[in-house]
């Protein structure tokens, strides 16, 4: 029996594109096989759940204004009850550390979840001021879960080129080269020309999917064309990384 796929978008740094990545993944998988559920775990910013055209459940993890670690058991049980559907989880910055600690301390991935799911971590790294934080997050996640999960890195250059002070691009940096064997795929999100960027920002503010845009008269033919260019580009990149079998790697 084929396993389901569990896609988790996460990094400890906020505002680096995790929810956008989750929305892209849901739409891509929906286009490919029409069989996807989403879970939004962000207690303060329900960006993914606000996209009404997607099948997203908001998971309430707060109790007395704090993250309730016990509620992660509810998430695990919910995942185990889902049958024949892939899942995308959007992990907010607030939820990041409690969730990672829960997974590590309970060994839920190896003991339970991996029997039902191929677990794929989608980790954004960004250019600009947050580059160092997101690179550290990538290293920490690979160190924590290698051998249990598959890693796909999203190189988000919206905030600036992923280039260090020595002029090395991301794929030349030590963070990438020493972990390359564990990284199943690399998806670049380049900064688009201004008019395309404006169209995509309009789509995000409208809490719309690519399909919603095509039916929405508030988007003119130029908006739709520019948004279509982005979809075609990203879908082509996801074809390359998600059509290949995923398998966790271990250090020898």
Image (spheres, rainbow, N blue to C red):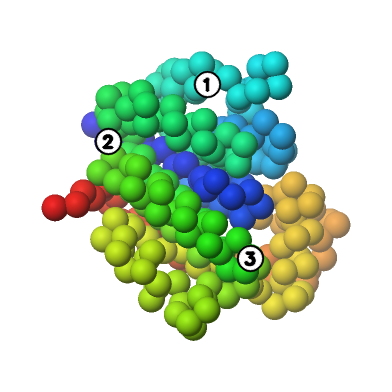
The image quadrant that residue 158 belongs to is bottom right
Q: Are the residues tagged 3 and 1 within 8 Å (C-beta)?
A: no
The mark nearer the N terminus, 3 or 1, is 1
Q: Are the residues tagged 2 and 1 within 8 Å (C-beta)?
A: no
Residue 32, placed above or below residue 153: above
Residue 231, placed above or below residue 5: below
Q: Where's residue 204, x and y in %?
A: 73, 53
**Residue displayed at 58% across by 68% down:** 127
Q: Which residue is mark 1?
A: 69
The image quadrant that residue 200 belongs to is bottom right
**Residue displayed at 49% across by 31% down:** 99
Residue 2, disc: 2
In the rendered image, the residue lying farthest to the bottom is 167
The mark nearer the N terminus, 2 or 3, is 2
Q: Where's residue 2, x and y in %?
A: 27, 36
The mark nearer the N terminus, 2 or 1, is 2
Label 2 crowd (10 A; few <14 / some 14-19 / many >=20): few
- SS assignment at label 2: loop
- SS assignment at label 1: loop
Q: Is residue 38 visible?
A: no
Q: Is residue 105 visible?
A: yes
Question: If the image is split into quadrants, where does the N terminus sit?
Answer: top left
* Disc nearest the viewer among 2 and 1: 1
Q: CA distance from mark 2 to mark 1?
A: 31 Å
**How many marks can you see?**
3
Q: Where's residue 138, x and y in %?
A: 44, 54
Q: Which residue is mark 3?
A: 129
**Residue displayed at 57% across by 75% down:** 161
In the rendered image, the residue lying farthest to the front is 165
The image quadrant that residue 7 belongs to is top left
- SS assignment at label 3: helix
Q: CA distance from mark 3 to mark 1?
A: 31 Å
């Amino acid at each position: 029996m084929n396993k389901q796929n569990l896609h988790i978008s996460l990094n400890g740094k906020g505002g680096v594109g995790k929810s956008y990545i989750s929305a892209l993944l849901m739409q891509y998988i929906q286009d490919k096989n029409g069989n996807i559920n989403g879970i939004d775990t962000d207690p303060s910013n329900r960006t993914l759940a606000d996209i009404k055209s997607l099948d997203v459940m908001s998971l309430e993890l707060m109790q007395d204004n704090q993250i309730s670690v016990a509620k992660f058991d509810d998430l695990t049980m919910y995942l185990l009850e889902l049958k024949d559907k892939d899942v995308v989880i959007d992990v907010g910055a607030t939820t990041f550390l409690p969730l990672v600690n829960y997974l590590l301390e309970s060994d839920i991935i190896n003991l339970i979840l991996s029997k039902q799911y191929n677990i794929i971590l989608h980790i954004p790294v960004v250019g600009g001021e947050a580059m160092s934080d997101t690179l550290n997050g990538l290293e920490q996640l690979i160190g924590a879960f290698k051998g249990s999960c598959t890693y796909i890195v999203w190189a988000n250059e919206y905030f600036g080129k992923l280039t260090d002070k020595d002029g090395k691009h991301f794929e030349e940096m030590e963070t990438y080269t020493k972990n390359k064997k564990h990284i199943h795929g690399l998806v670049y999100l380049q900064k688009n020309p201004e008019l395309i960027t404006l169209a995509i920002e309009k789509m995000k503010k409208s809490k719309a999917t690519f399909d919603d845009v095509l039916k929405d008269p508030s988007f003119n033919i130029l908006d739709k064309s520019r948004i279509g260019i982005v979809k075609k580009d990203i879908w082509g990149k996801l074809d390359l990384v998600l059509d290949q079998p995923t398998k966790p790697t271990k250090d020898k």
